[in-house]
Image (cartoon, rainbow, N blue to C red):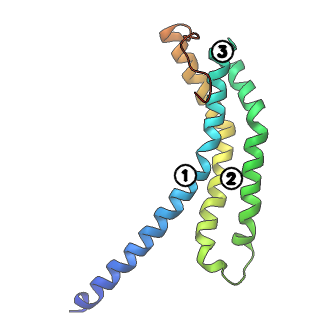
Amino acid sequence: MLLKYWGPLARDLWSVLVRRERLRQVVLMGVVVNNPILIVDQSLYNVRHQGMGALEAVRDAVKTRLRPIAMSSITTICGLSPLVFLPGAGTELYRGLGVIVLFGVAGATIVTLTFLPALTVLVLKIRDRHTGQWDRETAPAPGD
């Protein structure tokens, strides 16, 4: 009997919570996805067009793209810090979103600058071993 009255209310509440969680995931993915693309794209460009080896190409890509990645991550973290850490009027509603995005960006930046370069070197070396050299003449330039 109780379920008859509370069932629809619980379903509606669950639907709202699921929608909020999806919003958090979409915002985080939209912010985080750009940094790894910068490193992988520059690494592939270095291998294809500059004739670098896998390790040298990834080192150069990380060195060249470190500043833009750090700047975008630091500005996002600094912009969300007041929302997450300072209590105030209106912060209660968006604090959950801020926490997810803030710590997601921080974690993704660490992974992008540590794990991703190692994985990129591994993939490039495996590809070189199985297919020979990259096809430099037919490979598109970055952004094409």
- Secondary structure beneath label 1: helix
Which amino acid, by three-letter code, is at mark 3? Answer: His
Compare residues 62 and 44 and report the one nearer the observer: 44
Q: Residue furthest front?
A: 144
Residue that carries the numbered disc 2 in the rendered image: 106
- Secondary structure beneath label 3: helix
Residue that carries the numbered disc 3 in the rendered image: 49
Q: Position of residue 66 (x, y in %)?
A: 76, 37
Q: Position of residue 5 (x, y in %)?
A: 26, 91
Residue at 52% in and 17% down: 126
Q: How many marks?
A: 3
Compare residues 70 and 49 and report the one nearer the observer: 49
Q: In front: mark 1 or mark 3?
A: 3
* Dot placed on the residue nearer the N-terminal end, 2 or 3: 3
Q: Is residue 88 above or below residue 71?
A: below
Q: Is residue 36 left or right of residue 10?
A: right
Assess disc 3: are there few (<14), some (14-19) or many (≥20) residues with their C-alpha within 10 Å of its C-alpha: some
Quadrant of the frame with the N terminus = bottom left
Which amino acid, by three-letter code, is at mark 1? Answer: Met
Residue at 71% in and 64% down: 80
Residue at 72% in and 43% down: 69
Q: Position of residue 24 (x, y in %)?
A: 53, 63
Mark 2–mark 3 distance (CA, rounded to whole Å): 32 Å
Label 2–label 1 contact, CB within 8 A: no
Residue at 48% in and 69% down: 20
Q: Position of residue 108 (x, y in %)?
A: 63, 47
* Dot placed on the residue nearer the N-terminal end, 2 or 1: 1
Assess disc 1: are there few (<14), some (14-19) or many (≥20) residues with their C-alpha within 10 Å of its C-alpha: some
* Dot placed on the residue nearer the N-terminal end, 1 or 3: 1
